[in-house]
């Protein structure tokens, strides 16, 4: 139970003011029974009110336990997804990634002319299946004045095209330094 609920419950059962109930619970680390004893010793409640609380306390405890069990069962059913649900989420994620990789293009420019424009999926597959060919070709392309850009990329935490330009500029500077 939350602190506010305990204060309300204590007020309801003992008939004390909100402030007295709050003070009693705070003084007793929000233990309901200790708070009632505290209020009785302070003379804030009489024996009839505490007796009424004790008779309702057993049913309140069993109701609270039933509620806790029901809440726990609900949380388990929500948290434990079936294998089918997990697979559906995974395939939906794969579909979104595939769609995005087809919507985004990888463009190679040579001397301000577009040479190749292909979906990013082609680049990813080339990197996966022909890594040792693709990466050297991309590096050689930088030395042959090729520039790489991505088109269709939404906002990301860093600008991919800017990074590609910086890499190409660094290669150009290295070539100039060697001359």
Image: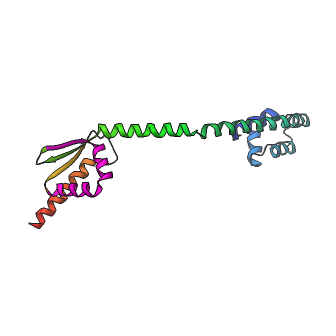
- Viewer-proximal residue, 82 or 8? 82
Q: Quadrant of residue 37?
A: top right
Look at the picture and state if 78 lies above or below 140. above
Q: Which residues are magenta?
A: 114-143
- Viewer-proximal residue, 52 or 38? 52
Q: Quadrant of residue 120?
A: top left
Screen quadrant of the N terminus: top right
- The residue most toward the left is 179
Tell me the residue at 88%/33% (across/down): 52
Tell me the residue at 38%/40% (across/down): 97
Image check: 40 left or right of 8? right
Q: Quadrant of residue 14?
A: top right
Look at the picture and state if 165 lies above or below 17. below
The stretch drawn in magenta includes residue 140: yes
Residue 175 appears in the figure: yes
The stretch drawn in magenta includes residue 165: no
């Amino acid at each position: 139970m939350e602190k506010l609920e305990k204060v309300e419950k204590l007020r309801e059962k003992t008939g004390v003011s909100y402030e007295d109930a709050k003070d009693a619970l705070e003084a007793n680390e929000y233990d309901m029974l200790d708070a009632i004893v505290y209020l009785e010793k302070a003379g804030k409640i009489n024996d009839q009110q505490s007796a009424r609380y004790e008779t309702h306390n057993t049913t309140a405890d069993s109701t609270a336990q039933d509620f806790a069990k029901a809440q726990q069962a609900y949380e388990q059913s929500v948290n434990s997804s079936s294998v089918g649900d997990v697979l559906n989420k995974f395939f939906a994620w794969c579909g979104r990634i595939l769609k995005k990789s087809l919507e985004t293009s990888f463009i190679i420019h040579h001397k301000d002319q577009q040479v190749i424009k292909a979906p990013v999926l082609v680049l990813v597959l080339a990197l996966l299946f022909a890594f040792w060919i693709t990466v050297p070709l991309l590096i050689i392309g930088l030395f042959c004045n090729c520039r790489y850009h991505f088109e269709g990329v939404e906002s990301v935490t860093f600008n991919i095209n800017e990074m590609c330009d910086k890499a190409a500029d660094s290669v150009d500077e290295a070539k100039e330094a060697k001359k």
